[in-house]
Amino acid sequence: MADPASLLEPLIPALRRYAFALLRDHEAADDLVQDTLERALSRWRLRRPDGDLRAWLFTLQRNLFINDWRQRQRRGPHASLDDVAPPASAAQQEAGLEVQDVLAALDQLPEEQKSLLLLIGVEDFSYDDAARILGVPMGTVMSRLSRGRQKLRSILETGRATLLRRVK
């Protein structure tokens, strides 16, 4: 049987991308990846040897993200007196504005639709793998994905996601 570290190492970049897409913070994303890898190694004996390691890791990561999100909802926002907000700077290019619009529109989607769009659109999972990761039937994946794409298009077309005003 292969060493767990040699099996996990090639999957770290994909885990980091997914974590950053969920959290929008590099430090928090790195923490989530570390927690995911720690959980995977501590429960290595519980995984199915014939199962998809990548799907198992993404399931662990998503569950850790949801648990942390629920905990933050119960506790409320963390406010530190020492924290100073850095000065905001506007994007200099149209592409930067469009990326911000898409990210803001993604944040407006329900968590189920957002997770599916990220798993299938960004991480290139199949519908079947996404269904296993989320623990829902294939039909639910397809309907949530369809509704998520439609809602994302609608948000982007109406401009409700625009954070910055474009001046021409």
Image: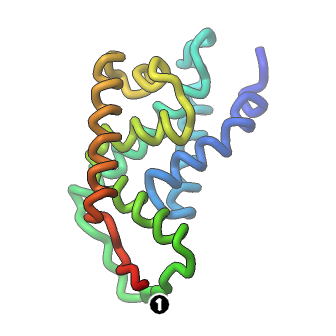
Q: Position of residue 37 (x, y in %)?
A: 60, 40
Which residue is under mark 1?
87
Please give the name of the residue rendered at 56% of the width and 62% of the height, measured from the top-left corner. 26
Quadrant containing the C terminus in the rendered view: bottom left
Say what amino acid the circle numbered 1 marks: Pro
Q: Position of residue 154 (x, y in %)?
A: 27, 51
Kind of element beneath mark 1: loop
**Outermost residue toward the top?**
50
Quarter of the view holding residue 100:
bottom left
Q: Is residue 10 above or below residue 160?
A: above
**Outermost residue toward the front?**
168
| Closest to the observer, 165 or 113 | 165
Q: Is residue 13 left or right of residue 1?
A: left
Please give the name of the residue rendered at 43% of the width and 20% of the height, measured from the top-left corner. 132
Q: Is residue 109 left or right of residue 34?
A: left
Please give the name of the residue rendered at 67% of the width and 42% of the height, measured from the top-left corner. 12
Q: Position of residue 120 (x, y in %)?
A: 48, 33
Q: Is residue 131 above or below residue 10?
A: above
Q: Residues within 10 Å of mark 1 (few under 14, many from 20)?
A: few
